Amino acid sequence: MSRSVFSSSEAKGYIRDEFDFNLIKRFKDEHYPNADLAYVGLPGEDLLDIISWRSFIGRWTAVQVTGSPALEDAADNLVANALKHRLERGFNIIRGNIDQLFRARSPKLKWPYQIVNLDYVGGLLGASDRLPAISELFSQQDGTAFILLLTLNLRDRDGGELEQTVSEEQEELKALGISGVDEVFTSHREFGHAGLLKIYVPLTLANMANRHSLSFGLPILYQGTKQMIHFAVICTPYLERKAGRTLRVSERVDLLNLPLGLLHRRDDLRKMQLGSLSLDSASQGAE
């Protein structure tokens, strides 16, 4: 049987086996100390994340896109590896496109899930279903605490939407009297597409998730099969107002002030602070 061209890397292994592993462990200890977690996502045929996190997982659903002989082989390999590693307990495979499954509220998906691993081969904006699918994910997870792991390829044909959205955010924050806006956005743009995504993704997810409060881990830029960026988010139900949560200016500032992780080798994760925004009395009043 053919093998997938998308293999793991040393940096990817560190994120999976150290960074995400420890995050999931803390999350389970806090939110589900006496229960196994349900998983849905894109583990790939080698099931490296399932193998790494197996001590936390009860039932799990692997989604594998098909449509070509190579992708059909990948789905078959996935099933074979589940049996090989004795992971068949609670196992379900869905052969299809995960974005379309989310959007269609497919009955094949057994909500809720406590680990959602969207380890995409591609980017965020080039696929028309992707953002609506993630929005639907939050709707389906209403009332459930979960971890969202989102990995994106930096090569994303977004048609200028990313830069436009980031520029609009920059101008809005300046109009609110936030200090340091131009410096922070310039520092992010020096990282190209990765810097723009580091602004765009947290703000977009936080605006989508009006029924959850989001706590972001360190966004990590790393070299996998391609250059990738990884986001890890703890999502907890927001219960304060029936109408849901609105994103405050101070929360937007906190998201932009997140450092960026740079990972070249397994033992070399560095944090880079891309400037710092600060609220003054006028901008605080705008909240």
Image: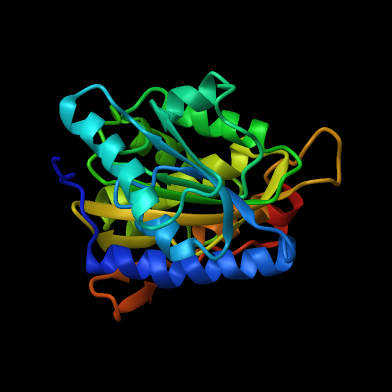
In the rendered image, the vertical position of residue 2 relative to residue 32, given as above or below: above
Percent of width and height locating residue 211: 73, 39
Q: 162 and 63: which one is in front?
A: 63
Q: How is the image coloured?
A: rainbow
Give the residue drawn at x 54%, y 66%: 55
Vertical arrangement, residue 198 with respect to residue 206, above or below = below
Residue drawn at x 82%, y 32% as measured from the top left: 243
Residue 276 point in image, percent of width and height: 49, 67
Residue at point 45%, 53% (across, down): 87
Name the residue furthest top: 104
Answer left or right for 217 relative to 152: right
Residue lying at 65% horizontally and 64% vertically, measured from the top left? 28
Residue 243 visible in the displayed image: yes
Relative to 262, 218 lies left or right: right
User: Which of 170 and 262 lies nearest the eye of the viewer?
Assistant: 262
Judge whether residue 185 can be spotted in this image.
no
Return the x and y of residue 134 as percentages of the image width and height. Answer: 52, 34
Q: Position of residue 184 (x, y in %)?
A: 42, 60
Question: Which quarter of the figure has residue 34?
Answer: bottom right
Image quarter for residue 16?
bottom left
